Every structure is written in structure tokens, then in C-alpha cells.
Amino acid sequence: MSHRFDPRNVKNLENEQRRRKLPPDKIINEIPLTGDETVADMGAGSGYFTIPLARRVKKVYAVDVEEKMLQYLDERIREEGVDHIEKILSPLEKTPFPDESMDLLFCSHVLHEVEDLNEGLAELKRITKKGGLIAILDWEKKQTNGGPPLEHRISSEEMEILLTGQQMHIIKRKDLGDYYLILAQR
């Protein structure tokens, strides 16, 4: 059984402590972007990364399985005045996107919530263009003061093994203390 974030706690995703530990622009700077990308923010939630990504790329699809999260994001999109974000209500494992349609998939703190991780990773690979990137930001599998239960976390080492099992090439792995960032190329 996976651990799913409770949408009633959406404001916790926007707090100052999180911004200090995971500054969105600093994380996004780790990803090579040209500005012409089509991006899917998988598990977009509050738009914590969606909106900063939209300021740097051509188009962002904000994908989330929770309608309440997308409603909250809709308010933020209006407040921020960003008009090239499209909200998609969908599970990560079965998206409506055509094969090889995304330049970048951004997966922040969401893969530990997926019921069948291999199915989820296969779907991510399916919708990523050849040469495209998948960026995974998640909790390291160690005890911390927040986040999902330890038994639901996926270590960076295990994530690398799973990605290479999908014939993805790891191009970057960065230790961010309680978190990790992995960039994999299709």
C-alpha cells in the first residue's frame, strides 16, 4: 500500500521552511532547459514546481490524481498570471498523453505514492521523447522530521536500479540531504 499526500494539507507544500530546504529555482537550475520544452509535472500538487517551470519552458501540463490539488493550483495559476499551464486529472500510471510527447517529466515527491512503481516508470518512459529527461526529486530512504513513512520511501540507489531496468540512462544524481534528485534520459 502506498502513502498518499492528504490534499487538506496543501498549504504545507508552500511554507517557508520547505522553500529554504527545497528552493524551486535552485532545483530547476539542475535540469538542462532550453526554454522550448513541453513538460509534464507529474503529481503537480500545489504547483510548487509547476509555476517556476512554466516561467522557463514553452508548455507545462500539471498532472495530479487529486482534483482538490488541481483546484488549488488553478487559484495559484490565476494569481501568478501564468497562462501556459494545462491541468490534467490523471493517475501517473495511466496518463492521456501520446507516446513520446514530453521533453521533460518532473516528478517531485510523487513516485513513493505510486501503487505499481514499475508500471508508473514504464508509463513515464512511454510519454518521454527519445533523448528527453525524467527528473525525480524524492525523499531519501532515511529517518527525517517529515515526509512519508520510511517504509514507503524509495532510496536513490533503488530508484537508479529501477530506472536503468527501464533502459533509462542516469545522467545526474545529486544528494540534497533528506532528498535526492535524479535525472534520467530516455
Image (cartoon, rainbow, N blue to C red):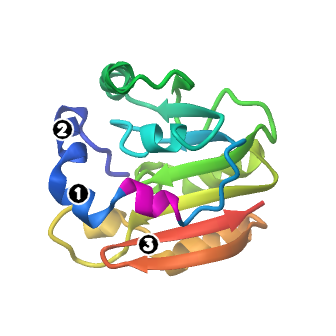
What amino acid type should be assigned to the residue bearing mark 2? Lys
The mark found on residue 84 in the picture is none
Q: CA distance from mark 2 to mark 1?
A: 11 Å
First of labels 2, 1 by sequence position: 2
Q: Position of residue 163 (x, y in %)?
A: 66, 67
Residue bearing the label numbered 3: 180
47 in magenta = no
Residue 147's quadrant in the figure?
bottom left
Q: On screen, 140 above or below 116?
A: below
Around disc 1, counting alpha carbons within 10 Å, would you say few (fewer than 14), some (14 to 19), or many (20 or more)? few
Position in image of residue 74 (x %, y %):
37, 20
- Residue 153 found in image quarter: bottom left
Which residue bears the numbered disc 1? Answer: 18
> For numbered disc 2, what is the local secondary structure?
helix
Q: Is residue 77 above or below residue 20?
A: above
Give 59 or 114, whichever is nearer the viewer: 59
Q: Amino acid at mark 1?
A: Arg
Image point (55%, 71%), residue name? 159
